[in-house]
Image: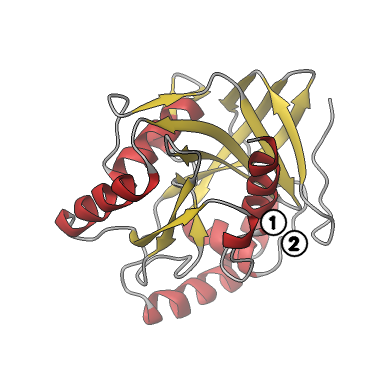
Amino acid sequence: MNAPTGDLCAAPVIARVAAVECRLVQRPWAWAEGERERIDAHWAELASRNPALFDGRVLVLHSGGVEGDVFRASYLETGFSRFIAWRDFGFPDRTIRNAFAMAALRSSDGAYLLGVMGPHTANSGKVYFPAGTPDLSDVVGDAVDLSGSVARELEEETGLTAADVAFADDWSVVTHGQRIALMRLVQAREAAEPLRQRILAELSRQKDPELSDIRIVRGTGDLDEAAMPPFVCAYLRQALGEA
């Protein structure tokens, strides 16, 4: 099994896999327990600045990686406050990874559409494909259903459903330090500009939309490295190069 690198300074690494197989295998998170007071103080400060933050339950990866043409991994359940402190403190526990699924939305004319995170979110201003940290709603039995997570996040953030798009069978696993983005190509039936307008109209109807805008990326000149994380830019460079 090829475990993902923990080097935050390294360039993102991309692997193509045929399937993603993940499970919820609960175990204690020793770092979070040992840092409870510091974590709680950090969360109190964040919540004072952004009362919309919610300390729900999320899943983080504690073991696994790419094995042949399959990504296999095990997750544990923890609080969002623990997760966000681990991230903000610079990923001090390198045995844990943030492994999440993303809907790589592509229009019929070959452009990619990404969302700008809203000001009330924990990642305000960042530009991503529709995605979310896995949570208990993604658990079916003991399986973590990341295919279902892709479809759910796509619908929640853009209003698009399986009636509007086709989901690729394979995945791109983009590893950058402690982050693992599991990218699934989502092919839309509309061209980029009308698709963007459709999503914006959906956002205008939502009470608290996660996204504040939609960006269109047709070429590498459209990449915004200040707002787009390195794993997103790496995926887009490869995808646009293959187009």
Would you place residue 175 above or below residue 229 in this image? above
Considering the image in quadrants, where does the N terminus appear?
top right
Between residue 174 and residue 216, name the one nearer to us: 216
- The x, y position of residue 45, in whole percent, is 46, 80
Q: Which residue is pictured at 50% across the width and 30% down the height?
A: 146
Say which mark, if any, is on residue 31: 1
Mark 1 neighbour density, 10 Å: few (under 14) some (14–19) many (20 or more): some
- What residue appears at the point 55 percent right and 18 percent down from the top-left corner? 169
Q: Nearer the viewer, residue 221 or 55?
A: 221
Can residue 97 be seen here? The reply is no
- x%, y% of residue 109? 45, 38
| Rendering coords of residue 55 (x, y %) | 40, 59
Residue at x 18% of width, y 59% of height: 204
Does dot 2 land on a helix, a strand or a loop? loop
Q: Say left or right for 127 vs 188.
A: right
Q: Along the line of sight, which residue is nearer the eye, 102 or 113?
A: 113
Q: Is residue 196 above or below residue 59?
A: below
Q: Is residue 131 visible?
A: yes
